[in-house]
């Protein structure tokens, strides 16, 4: 009897999640989803003199270095001062990073809750841990349950909407000749000032950004 109840409960939970995901997709159009996620993946003043479009991969070691060492400085000294605007885009290298695509799905869904940056930071901070267990839902449930609404997060992921957006980001990156991560496109106004491929030590990055601002 207990086994039957357990089986029934498991089936019920999976059915509920599937139904919730279907309702989620029906309630939000893809264009609306893209607009909201993109808004959540941008930081700074959109009218800033310089814009950085950053293509990154959540399992990329060098992306983590950028996140840990360069990005905090950039945010403090350039973004918060209104000089630089940053847009993040997904470019999971699925051939070598098995869970990068799924990480991007959860990060993008967190953007709908206004929590993209906290979840982005957490995924990079604990990159080794969740990469080793391969279960990002469990990781976020146990490490970010106080940051995001997990049932809402899971419904978003299962809706298929983030998958479409990530594939679109990959296409745009491929068309822009992105071959690895991190890749930064630094624009001065509408003019591309410099393409930065791979991780650059902070002093070099500061030099590049100051050059773009001159």
Image (cartoon, rainbow, N blue to C red):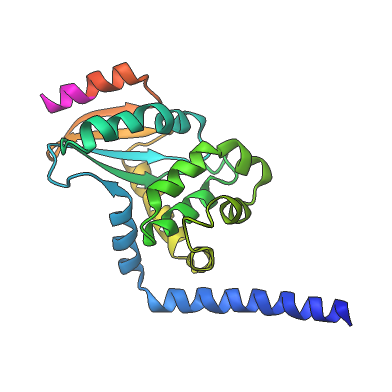
| Residue 118 screen position, x and y as percent | 42, 47
| Residue 3 screen position, x and y as percent | 87, 76
5 w.r.t. 74: above or below = below
Residue at x 64%, y 51% (from the top left corner): 135
* 57, 78: nearer the viewer: 78
Residue at x 12%, y 37% (from the top left corner): 49
12 w.r.t. 127: above or below = below
Q: Can the viewer see residue 96 in this picture?
A: no
Q: Is residue 193 left or right of residue 203?
A: left
Q: Quadrant of the N terminus?
A: bottom right
Would you say the magenta stretch is mainly helix, strand or loop? helix
Task: State yes or no: residue 123 in magenta.
Answer: no
Q: Is residue 136 left or right of residue 60?
A: right
| Residue 201 screen position, x and y as percent | 37, 19
Q: Residue furthest right?
A: 1
Q: Is residue 103 left or right of residue 211?
A: right
Residue at x 21%, y 32% (from the top left corner): 78
Q: Quadrant of the C terminus?
A: top left
Residue numbers of the magenta segment: 209-214
> Can you tell which quarter of the image residue 208 is in?
top left
Q: Residue furthest front?
A: 146
| Residue 168 screen position, x and y as percent | 38, 54
> Can you tell which quarter of the image residue 127 is in?
top right
Residue at x 29%, y 62% (from the top left corner): 35
Q: Can the viewer see residue 6 in this picture?
A: yes
Task: State yes or no: residue 212 in magenta.
Answer: yes
């Amino acid at each position: 009897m207990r086994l039957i109840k357990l089986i029934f409960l498991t089936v019920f939970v999976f059915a509920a999640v599937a139904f919730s995901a279907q309702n989620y997709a029906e309630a939000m159009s893809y264009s609306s989803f893209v607009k909201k996620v993109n808004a959540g993946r941008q930081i700074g003043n959109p009218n800033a003199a310089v814009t950085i479009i950053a293509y990154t991969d959540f399992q990329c070691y060098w992306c983590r270095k950028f996140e840990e060492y360069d990005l905090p400085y950039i945010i403090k000294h350039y973004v918060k001062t209104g000089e630089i605007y940053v847009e993040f885009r997904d470019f999971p290298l699925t051939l070598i990073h098995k869970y990068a695509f799924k990480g991007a799905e959860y990060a993008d869904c967190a953007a709908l809750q206004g929590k993209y940056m906290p979840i982005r930071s957490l995924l990079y901070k604990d990159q080794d841990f969740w990469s080793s267990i391969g279960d990002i839902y469990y990781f976020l449930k146990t490490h970010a349950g106080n940051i995001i609404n997990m049932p809402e997060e899971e419904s978003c992921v299962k809706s298929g909407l983030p998958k479409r957006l990530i594939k679109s980001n990959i296409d745009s990156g491929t068309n822009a000749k992105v071959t690895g991560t991190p890749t930064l496109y630094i624009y001065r106004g509408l003019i591309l000032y410099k393409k930065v491929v791979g991780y650059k030590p902070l002093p070099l990055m500061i030099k590049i950004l100051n050059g773009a601002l001159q």
